[in-house]
Image (spheres, grey):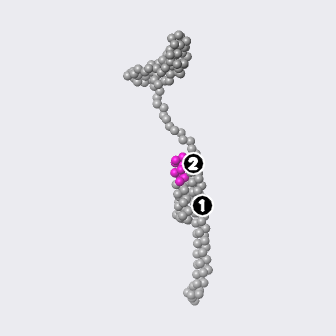
Amino acid sequence: MSTPATEKAREAGELHPSPAVGKNGYAPLPNVPDDCVEGAVPPVGLPPPVYQSNPNFQQACTQYQAPPQPSFMVRQTEPQPPDYLPLALVVTVCCCLPFGIIGVVKAMEVRNRYTIGDMIGARDASRAAKRWSLAGLISGIVIQVILYGFLVVYYVAILPQLLNQAGLQDGR
C-alpha cells in the first residue's frame, strides 16, 4: 500500500496492528518501554516515524540497554604442515650445503604461506623442503662414504706401495 492509502485505511479503522507491533509502529522489545526503542525497523507499508531529539534519552534508557557483546573472528584452519627446518639446517651444516640451503628456503616458505592462509602452498612447500633436505642428507652420506672409502684404500693399499717403491718404509 502507498502512504495515502495507508492513512485512509487507518482513518477508516481497517488497519489493526498485530500484537507484535507496538503503538509507535515498531516491534516492541521485551521489558523495554516504547519510548526507549531506538533504531527499530518499522513494518512494511508504514511511513518511517519522525524522530524528535530527546536529550535525556540516554539517561532514561540506560537500564534497558543490552551490554556490549564481544566480537571476534573464529578462523578454522588445519594445523601448520611440518616445515622440516631442523633437518634442513643439519643438512646445510653437516652434509650438503647447496641442497641444505634450498631446504631452508622451502622450510621458511612453509611458515610464510601458512601465515597468509595459503594451505595448499604450505603443503607443497613442506613436501619440497622434505624432498630437498632428504636429497641433501642422502647425497651427503653417499659422498662421505665414498670419501672415507677412498681414504681407507689410499692409506691401506696405495700409500704403503708408494713408500715401498721410494724405499722409505720402516724396517729396512
Task: Residue 165: name its quadrant.
Answer: bottom right
Name the quarter where the N terminus is drawn: top right
Q: Farthest top residue?
A: 12
Which of the marked residues, 2 or 1, is nearer the chain's N terminus? 2
Is residue 90 among what the camera can see? no
SS state under label 2: helix
Residue 29 location, x and y as percent? 50, 21
Give the labeled residue for mark 2.
119
Q: Is residue 54 above or below residue 159?
A: above
Q: Quadrant of residue 100?
A: bottom right
Q: Which class describes the residues within 10 Å of circle 2: few (<14), some (14-19), or many (20+)?
A: some
Magenta part of the protein: which range? Answer: 109-120
Tell me where residue 101 appears, x and y as whole percent: 53, 61
Residue assigned mark 1: 134
Nearest the camera: 159 or 111?
A: 111
**Is residue 49 at least partly visible in the picture?**
yes
Image depth: mark 2 or mark 1 in front: 2
Residue 118 image position (x, y, % from top left): 55, 48
Amino acid at dot 2: Met
Q: Nearer the viewer, residue 39 or 107?
A: 39
Q: Residues within 10 Å of mark 1 (few under 14, many from 20)?
A: some
Query: How far is disc 2 from disc 1 in space, using C-alphas?
Result: 22 Å
